[in-house]
Image (tube, rainbow, N blue to C red):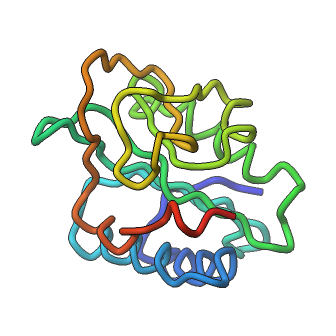
Amino acid sequence: MKIRKVNEETRAKVYALLRSAFPKSENEALLVQKLHAQGRPIFDWVCLHTNKVIAYIAFSNAYHGSDRCGLHLAPMAVAPEFQRQGVGSELLHFALRQERIKSEPLYVLGQPDYYKRFGFEPCRLPLCPFDKNNAHFLSLRNLATSSFMIGYEPEFKILAKPAERRR
C-alpha cells in the first residue's frame, strides 16, 4: 500500500471510489469533483494498492464567518472490499501527521466511536449546520469558546440534509 497526494491521474479513480463506498449517494463524489473543479484549497490523499485507489481522505477549510478557523475532514472513504482491514485507520493516522494538518483545529461529522480513537472529542462549540444538537460532530484541537455556526466551502450545499441519512 502506498499513500499519495491526489493528482490529475487519480481524480477519476477517487470519484469512482466515492461512488462505490457510498452506493446510496452521489453527493460525496459530486462534492469532491466540485471542490477540485473550483480549485478550492483541499488537502487530500489516496491509498493505492496495485495501482487501484482503495481509500481516500480530504480536508477543506472550516470558517467562523469569513475567517478560516480550521479544517473539515470530509469525506473519507474505503473501497467496500478493503473495509474493516485497517486501511481507513492507517490513512487517517497518516493524514493527522502531515504538517498542514497536525497543527490545525479539525472538525468531522461522523461516527463518534470511530473518530474518538484518533483523539477527536464531541464538539459543543461551534455548532454544525448539518447535525442537530452536534450529536455526531467532533473536533480535535478545537479552541472555540463562543457559539457560532461553523461554515463550510459553498460546494457542501449539496449535503444540505446529511443528518437525515445517518448510516
Residue 130: % across, % down = 41, 55
Residue 79: % across, % down = 74, 71
Residue placed furthest toward the left: 66
- The image shows residue 92, relative to residue 148, as above or below, that is below
Tell whether 147 sits left or right of 89.
Answer: left
Residue 101: % across, % down = 44, 33
Q: Residue at x 83, y 62 (%)?
A: 83
Query: How many labels sit on residues?
Result: 0
Q: Residue at x 70, y 55 (%)?
A: 2
Residue 138: % across, % down = 53, 35
- The image shows residue 54, relative to residue 150, as above or below, that is below
Q: Residue at x 64, y 24 (%)?
A: 119
- The image shows residue 107, relative to residue 162, as above or below, that is above
Residue placed furthest toward the right: 85
Q: Closer to the camera, 20 or 50?
A: 20
- The image shows residue 77, relative to residue 66, as above or below, that is below
- Quarter of the image for the N terminus: give it: bottom right
Tell whether 98 sits left or right of 153.
Answer: right
